[in-house]
Amino acid sequence: MKGRDLATIDAVEKVLLQHDYVADRVLATVVFLSLKLGKPLLLEGEAGVGKTQVAKTLAEVLDAPLIRLQCYEGLDVNNTIYEWNYTRQLLHIRMLEAQSCDIDASVERDLFGEEYLIKRPLLQAIELSAGGQAPVLLIDELDRADEEFEAFLLELLSDFQITIPEIGTMRAARPPVVVITSNRTREIHDALKRRCIYHWIDYPTLEKEYSIVNLKVPGASALLAGQLVHFVQELRRLDLYKLPGVAETLDWAEALVTLDARELELGLDPYNADPDGDGVADGDELDIYATDPFNWGSDGDGSSDGEELCGIRTDPLDWTAAPEAVSADQTLSADSTDSAAAS
C-alpha cells in the first residue's frame, strides 16, 4: 500500500473498509495520526470490540509483516526480546570437547553469536525495521502484563533500540507501526499513554454492527442479521457480568448460517413451553424482533409489517396476557411520553 493511499482520513476510512474493517470517523482519525506522526496507537475497550483486528487490518493495508506479542502475567525479557539457545550452545561445547579442542576466546565469541540467539517478538520487530521493512508490532492485552514490563516497554518505545551485551546495540532504521491493546483490567501508566495516540473503542451502534455482520457474514440474510444485531444490542442494556462483543455477534451469526437459519423464530422456551398444559405461554418465551431494524414501515400503511418489535405487553409482569401489537409510531410516542414524565 502506497503512502499516498493513506494521505487523508477519508482514505484511511475507505481502505480499512476495503479490507473488511468497519471504522468510524474517530477511529480512522487516530489511525491516520498514528501513521503520520509515527507514534504507537493505544487502543482500550471491552473484549471483543475489534482492537486486535485493527493491527491485523493495518498489516494487510500496509503489506507489512505482523509481529504479535501476547501479554500475560510474569512476562520478562526472555519471552519478549531474546534468550540464548543454551541447549545448542551446550551441544557445541560437547562436540568441541570430543574433538579435544581448546575453548578459547574465539570459541566463546562464536557461542554468543547471532546463530545461537533466539529472537523474540520485540527483537524481531527491531531487526525487520533495521532492514528497511517496518512491520506492524501488536502488543496485545498489555494490562495483563506486570508493571515492570510496562516500564521496560516505555524505554523501548522511546528509542526503538535494544542492546544485547554480547553482540551490541540494534536500532530500528524505520520505527515499526506499533498497536497496543488493553481491556483495562488495570490502569495503564500515564507515562506510557503520553507516548501514544490513545483511543477508546466502545461497543458499536446498531447501524455499525449491522454493517459489520453483513460484511463479515455475507451468508446471513438481511432479516437474520437485523434480528440478531437488535437482540445483541438489547442484551448490552442488561446488567450482565460479561456483555457480548462484536466477536460474539459474529460467532452467533456464523453458527446460525451454518445451521441454515434464515431468521430467528418466535416461540416458547424449548425446555418448558407450556408447563401446566393449558395451552398458554406462562412467561417462558421471548418476544424476538422481526426484520430490518432500520425500516419501521416501508409501505407507509401504518401497520407493523414485521419490521418492528413483535409486541409490547401492557403489564410486563402478566405473562398470561397476549402481547398488544403496536406500530412504530405508537412505540415512539410512548418513548416520548416516558421521557416527558421523567423530566
Image (spheres, rainbow, N blue to C red):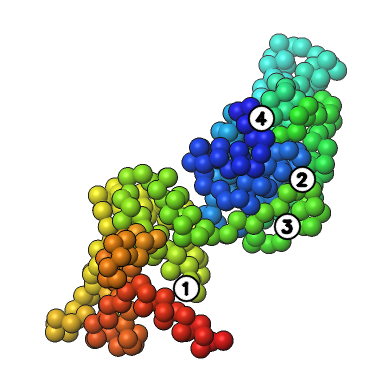
42 left or right, relative to 148: left
Question: Which residue is labeled 4 in the image?
Answer: 4
Q: Which mark is in front, 1 or 2? A: 1
Q: Mark 3 points at which residue?
A: 188
Q: Residue 97 carries which label?
A: none
- Whether the residues at callouts 4 and 2 have beta carbons within 8 Å, the answer is no
User: Viewed as shown, does residue 135 lie left or right of 17?
Assistant: right
Question: Does any portion of residue 255 appear in the rendered image?
Answer: no
Q: Earlier in the sequence, mark 4 or mark 1?
A: 4
Which image quarter holds the C terminus?
Answer: bottom right
The Cα–Cα distance between marks 1 and 2, rounded to whole angstroms, is 38 Å
Q: Is residue 331 visible?
A: yes
Query: Which residue position holds label 2?
Result: 153
**Mark 3 or mark 4, whichever is nearer to me:** 4
Q: How crowded is mark 3: few (under 14 residues within 10 Å), some or many (20 or more)?
A: some
* Amino acid type shown at disc 4: Arg
Q: Looking at numbered disc 2 in the image, what kind of residue is underneath it?
A: Leu
Is residue 151 placed above or below 15 in the rendered structure?
Answer: below
Q: How far apart are marks 3 and 4 (CA)?
A: 34 Å
x and y percentages locating residue 132 in the rendered image: 72, 23
Q: How far apart are marks 4 and 2 (CA)?
A: 31 Å
Q: Earlier along the polypeptide chain: callout 3 or callout 4?
A: 4
Percent coordinates x, y for residue 150 in the rendering: 75, 50
**SS of the residue at dot 4?**
helix
C-alpha gap between disc 1 and disc 3? 28 Å
Q: Is residue 324 left or right of residue 161?
A: left
Question: What residue appears at the point 68 percent right and 48 percent down from the top-left corner?
Answer: 30
Q: How far separated are the C-alphas under marks 4 and 1? A: 45 Å
